[in-house]
Image (cartoon, rainbow, N blue to C red):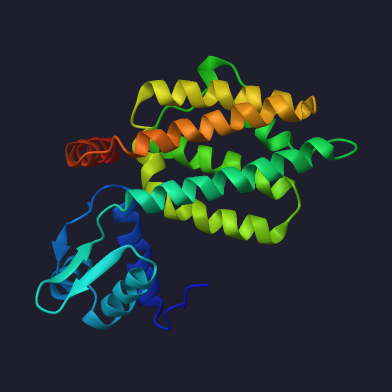
């Protein structure tokens, strides 16, 4: 588990900078200094430094001796490996769910995903959060706390990719449709069919990772800024 900064302001800066990375305000390769960030956030350099070194330990930032700080470039091989691990964890969760006796703890997921078209979420950032919650809830419902912890950590590492994916309207529609199908198959204990669809669903997101370009990231930054107005 990552070390927590002693300074509460450090925690605040840590969360803000991480959100700026996830929301495309800071893109891979963007550079800044501790002094610039401290001035922008209205805090001293001490909590800024605490937060930045924590983000460096977690792999989000790099620091140079003379060049200051920069956002870590995308490591596409690492994303591939994280998606492979995600598939293993979620497939195991679905198998355990389908083997449960009695009613499955999926009421909240049904209330979110088995809804009419007019009740569907369309805002990309909210949609990405709902997507994360769906997959985490499947793992949680399977009842293995260590698997859930691993899955939550993995989810954060690929968050920026998933938010980028939901800037495409067709991916929002596809996600609702596929989540609904996966849920219905699990509730009917159709383990084999649910696993096939789940793997296809996650693999589609995995395949989109390799298509990411710097131009797409700049477009995403513009879109997220306009949505925040």
In-front residue for pair 99/76: 76
Q: Residue at x 27, y 38 (%)?
A: 212
In-front residue for pair 215/78: 78
Q: Residue at x 80, y 28 (%)?
A: 189
Question: In the image, 24: left or right of 39?
Answer: right
Q: Is residue 218 above or below residue 20?
A: above
Tell me where residue 28 appears, x and y as whole percent: 22, 53
In-front residue for pair 76/14: 76
Q: Is residue 12 above or below residue 119?
A: below
Question: In the image, 125: left or right of 44?
Answer: right
Question: In the image, 16: left or right of 191?
Answer: left
Q: Is residue 28 above or below residue 129?
A: below
Tell me where residue 178 appears, x and y as whole percent: 57, 24
Task: Mark yes or no: residue 132 visible.
Answer: yes
Q: Residue at x 38, y 63 (%)?
A: 15
Question: In the image, 229: left or right of 65?
Answer: right
Q: Quadrant of residue 216?
A: top left
Residue pushed farthest left? 66
Q: Quadrant of the C terminus?
A: top left
Tell me where residue 62 appears, x and y as whole percent: 24, 68
Q: Residue at x 30, y 62 (%)?
A: 17
Task: Mark yes or no: residue 113 visible.
Answer: no
Residue pushed farthest top? 117
In this figure, what is the number of numbered marks?
0
Q: Quadrant of residue 69?
A: bottom left
């Amino acid at each position: 588990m990552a070390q927590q900064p002693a300074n509460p302001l450090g925690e605040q800066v840590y969360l803000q900078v991480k959100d700026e990375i996830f929301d495309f305000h800071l893109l891979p390769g963007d550079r800044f200094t501790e002094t610039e960030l401290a001035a922008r956030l209205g805090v001293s350099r001490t909590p800024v430094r605490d937060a930045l070194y924590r983000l460096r330990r977690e792999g989000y930032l790099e620091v140079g001796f003379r060049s200051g700080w920069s956002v870590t470039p995308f490591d596409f091989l690492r994303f591939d490996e994280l998606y492979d691990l995600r598939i293993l964890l979620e497939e195991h969760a679905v198998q355990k769910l389908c083997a449960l006796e009695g009613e499955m703890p999926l009421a909240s997921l049904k209330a979110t995903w088995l809804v009419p078209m007019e009740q569907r979420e369309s805002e990309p950032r909210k949609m990405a959060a709902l997507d994360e919650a769906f997959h985490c809830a499947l793992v949680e419902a399977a009842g293995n706390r260590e698997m859930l912890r691993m899955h939550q950590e993995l989810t954060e590492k690929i968050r920026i990719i998933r938010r980028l994916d939901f800037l495409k309207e067709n991916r929002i529609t596809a996600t609702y449709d596929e989540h609904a199908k996966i849920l219905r198959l699990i509730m009917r204990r159709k383990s084999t069919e649910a696993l096939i669809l789940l793997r296809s669903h996650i693999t589609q997101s995995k395949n989109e990772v390799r298509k990411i370009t710097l131009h797409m990231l700049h477009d995403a930054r513009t879109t997220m800024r306009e949505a925040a107005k």
